[in-house]
Image: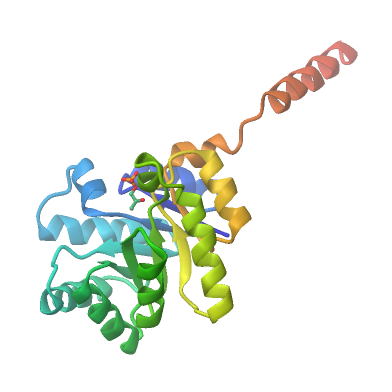
């Protein structure tokens, strides 16, 4: 399972990349706004800055919601760097735009997936990645992980090639469960990735080893 980081914060992207386990980055308009990145020029430059840190796919989301606008924006984004993946919302014109980019060999990430039906349509259009939002489903009392498992099953039965990118990850359990049920990728905040490192028995075990070493070497 690939690990993407879900942020536009360059320091966090660097920290995750330095761990040596990072495979890519996802952003969205909210994450860009959170970093204070405003205006087309600044946004495009920020994507290039991210691509210069991580050697892996970087999802850059279109703002347009009509077909022509998504094509124009997506082509500009894709021209920025070979690793840019055009992120497109799960709407009617979005499906048409994904089909267009697929025919041009440009990678896409179909975002805002909340149902198996949407995942089937995105796969049919040839999306490279599809992003079901686990946390936001949990927030409204639907089990987000059940959706990941259902899509994984359908894709296996049907032989669909789109990669399931579990998004809206909120905690380390979401990452572990995503791996268990067959997500190809997770995109997560840095905090949930770092939380995977932690276990109290690791900490106490290491403290004991170091204390015993110190005793026997005094
Ligand atoms: O990038 C899309 C997704 O990961 C957003 O997550 O936490 O805003 O639901 P969240």
Q: What x and y, as percent, mark residue 111?
A: 32, 62
Residue at horizontal 48%, vertical 69%? Answer: 163
Q: Is residue 164 left or right of residue 80?
A: right
Rendered location of residue 56, percent (x, y): 45, 64
178 to 158, vertically: above or below:
above
The image shows residue 198 at horizontal and vertical percentages of 61, 31
Nearest the camera: 160 or 82? 160
Q: Residue at x 50, y 51 (%)?
A: 145
Residue extending farthest right = 216
- Answer above or below: position of 100 versus 10: below
Compared across the picture, whether 142 is left or right of 70 comes to right
Specify the quadrant of the image occupied by residue 128: bottom left
Q: Which residue in the rendered view is the most extreme toward the front?
A: 141
Q: Position of residue 45 (x, y in %)?
A: 21, 59
**The N terminus appears in which quarter of the rendering?**
bottom right
Q: Residue at x 49, y 58 (%)?
A: 148
Res 27 seen here: yes
């Amino acid at each position: 399972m690939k690990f993407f980081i879900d942020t536009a914060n360059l320091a966090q992207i660097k920290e995750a990349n330095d761990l040596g386990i990072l495979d890519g980055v996802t952003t969205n308009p909210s994450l860009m706004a959170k970093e204070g990145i405003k205006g087309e020029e600044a946004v495009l430059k920020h994507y290039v800055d991210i691509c210069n840190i991580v050697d892996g796919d970087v999802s850059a989301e279109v703002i347009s919601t009509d077909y022509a606008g998504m094509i124009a924006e997506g082509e500009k984004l894709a021209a920025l760097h070979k690793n840019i993946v055009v992120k497109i919302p799960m709407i009617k014109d979005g499906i048409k735009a994904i089909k267009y980019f697929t025919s041009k060999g440009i990678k896409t990430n179909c975002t805002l997936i909340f149902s198996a039906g949407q995942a089937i349509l995105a796969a049919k259009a040839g999306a490279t990645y599809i992003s079901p939002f686990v946390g936001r489903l949990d927030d409204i009392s639907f089990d987000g992980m059940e959706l990941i498992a259902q899509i994984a099953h359908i894709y296996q039965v049907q032989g669909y090639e789109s990669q399931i990118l579990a998004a809206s990850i909120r905690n380390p359990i979401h990452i572990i469960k995503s791996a268990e049920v067959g997500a190809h990728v997770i995109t997560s905040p840095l905090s949930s990735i770092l939380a995977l490192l932690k276990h109290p028995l690791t900490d106490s075990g290491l403290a004991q080893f170091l204390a015993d070493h110190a005793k026997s070497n005094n």
